[in-house]
Image (cartoon, helix red, strand yellow):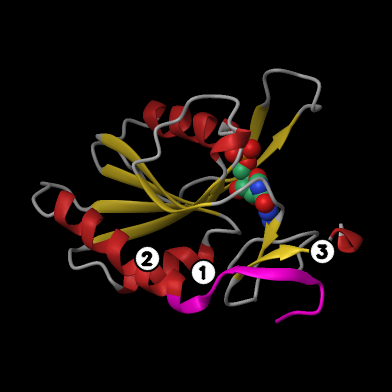
Amino acid sequence: MHAHLDKILINQVEIVERSKQLAKEISEKYAKTDKPLILVALLKGSVPFLAELMKHMSIDIEIDFMDVSSYGTNMESTRDIRILKDLDRSIKEHPIVIVEDIVDTGRTLQAVIKILDNKGAQSIEVVSLLDKPSRREVEVDVAYIGFEIPNEFVVGFGLDFAEKYRELPYIGILHKDFY
Ligand code: 5GP
């Protein structure tokens, strides 16, 4: 275990097994769509999860990436997001599954769903590796959830603190001396 962690919350085997199950569910749901499913991954945190998930999909898929950052202070009840990297291609009339690392307040997803809806997606669902339901501020429908976790700051498997720890192959709780 990395020395900056209090403990490992979810190990690599658990992540792989859960990703297989989610890939199966998503593959079954989108087996008969006329246009291919596009997995839209939100950079950078969801990259390892996307890679794990897509390996186990049993249908044709395409992938694309978006990078967004939220701005506004914590005091504001509404936050806006800025698009740092937009999709490379049109998603018009394609079914979309957004791939996210963690849903916290829900505000990032709420904004991204609106953007993809405006781009003319046929349908939009969300798969998130982690969910912190106790922190939710806005309601978002997350159709596929890997693991529900308590209100702790976690890193690893794509999740960072100041760009560190993304490479860890598991999810761990960061010791408070390090953030
Ligand atoms: P939301 O808009 O749902 O509040 O924010 C989701 C984003 O916040 C995630 O994509 C992630 O970047 C960040 N985030 C929320 N909770 C955590 C956490 O426990 N650890 C890390 N590393 N990032 C988090």
- Near mark 3 (Cα within 10 A), the count class, few <14, some 14-19 or many ≥20, is some
Give SS at disc 1. Answer: helix
Is label 1 or label 3 in front? 3
- Near mark 2 (Cα within 10 A), the count class, few <14, some 14-19 or many ≥20, is some
Residue under label 2: 18
Q: Earlier in the sequence, mark 3 or mark 2?
A: 2
Locate residue 168: give its quadrant: bottom right
Q: Is residue 7 magenta?
A: yes
Residue occupying image coordinates x 58% and y 73%: 170
Give SS at disc 2. Answer: helix
State whether residue 83 is above or below residue 21: above
Residue under label 1: 48
Q: What percent of the width, then of the height, locates residue 3?
A: 81, 79
| Residue 102, numbered label | none
Q: What percent of the width, then of the height, locates residue 133?
A: 54, 38
Q: Is residue 178 magenta?
A: no
Q: Earlier in the sequence, mark 2 or mark 1?
A: 2
Q: Earlier in the sequence, mark 1 or mark 3?
A: 1
Identify the magenta region.
Answer: 1-13
Pointers 3 and 2 in contact (C-beta within 8 Å): no
Is label 2 or label 1 in front? 2
In the rendered image, is residue 83 in sight?
Answer: no
- Near mark 1 (Cα within 10 A), the count class, few <14, some 14-19 or many ≥20, is some
State whether residue 80 is above or below residue 25: above
Between residue 5 and residue 34, name the one nearer to us. Answer: 5
Q: What percent of the width, then of the height, locates residue 164?
A: 76, 68
Between residue 53 and residue 149, name the one nearer to us. Answer: 149
| Residue 175, numbered label | 3
State the separation of the CA atoms marked 3 and 2.
Answer: 26 Å
Amino acid type indicated by mark 2: Arg
Amino acid type indicated by mark 1: Pro
